[in-house]
Amino acid sequence: MGGGVLRDFDTKIYHRLLTVPGGRPVRYAAGQVICFQGGEANALVVVSGADIKVQYVSASGRKYTLGQEENYFGVLGEMELFSGSGTHMLSVVAVNPVVGYQLTREKVLGALVKMPDLALDFLALMSNRYHTTVTRAMENILYGLRFNALKRLVDLSDAADHGAFTVAQDIEAESLGTSSRAYRRVLKSLIDEGVLEKHGNSFKLINPEHAFSEIQT
């Protein structure tokens, strides 16, 4: 999840699905799983203003956070709604209490048949989500921890206009499928090498050229 285009698709679909009759209101407490990896996928949930994270647990038990959204307006659980397996590939967890509107598979399919433009928006949303999820997973598989951590730091630096930025270390570690301790070791190594500088709770790339060249090799 993430990105302006994806959020636009979600917001558009969110407003359309709220008009579909036959749904029911649902509530999730902080830390509660909205969609459970391996669980039955027979409905989707439309949420508003939700703080959520998307996770995947490997066969070895390693947990990856593939995305995190704040104040999210959109749909959850749609990826597997049309698949033959009928089970969720990923888990979606409520970071804070979430209020939503749940629609069964039958209600959603009926709405898509009646509203072809909504069906096209769904296809675009699912295509974007698939690309984002697979890209993140492949980077974690193909590249080492330092590479992926540095790539993320470059992104954070770019977003901060090459100024100071904060790093949610536990979340970043989880997104890379590693421990907070291992992630902090990477940060320390980059600081010792003169690539990264720490100012209180903030960081700054002081040698962005070196960082960029390393992730391009």
Image (tube, rainbow, N blue to C red):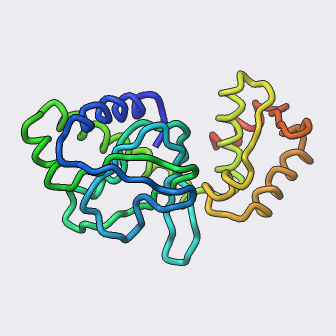
Q: 6 or 23, which is in the foreground?
A: 23
List x then y, in percent, for residue 76.
37, 49
- Judge left or right: residue 113 versus residue 146: left
Whether residue 22 is visible, yes or no, is yes
Q: In the current view of this chain or complex, which residue is farthest to the top?
A: 161
User: Residue 119's spot in the image, x, y percent?
Assistant: 17, 38
Q: Quadrant of residue 13?
A: top left
Q: Nearer the viewer, residue 82 or 163?
A: 82
Q: Does 60 appear above or below 116? A: below
Q: Quadrant of residue 124?
A: top left
| Outermost residue toward the left in this view | 114
- Say which quadrant the C terminus sits in: top right
Residue farthest to the bottom? 60
**Residue 63: x %, y % from top left:** 57, 66
Camera-nearest residue between 111 and 187: 111
Q: Which residue is depicted at the point 19% across and 39% down?
A: 20
Residue 78 seen in render: no
Q: What residue is at 49 percent from the left and 76 percent from the top?
A: 59
Does residue 198 sit above or below 84 in this rendering?
above
| Residue 179 x %, y % | 72, 65
Kindly identify the residue that appears in the image at 51 percent across and 59 percent down: 55
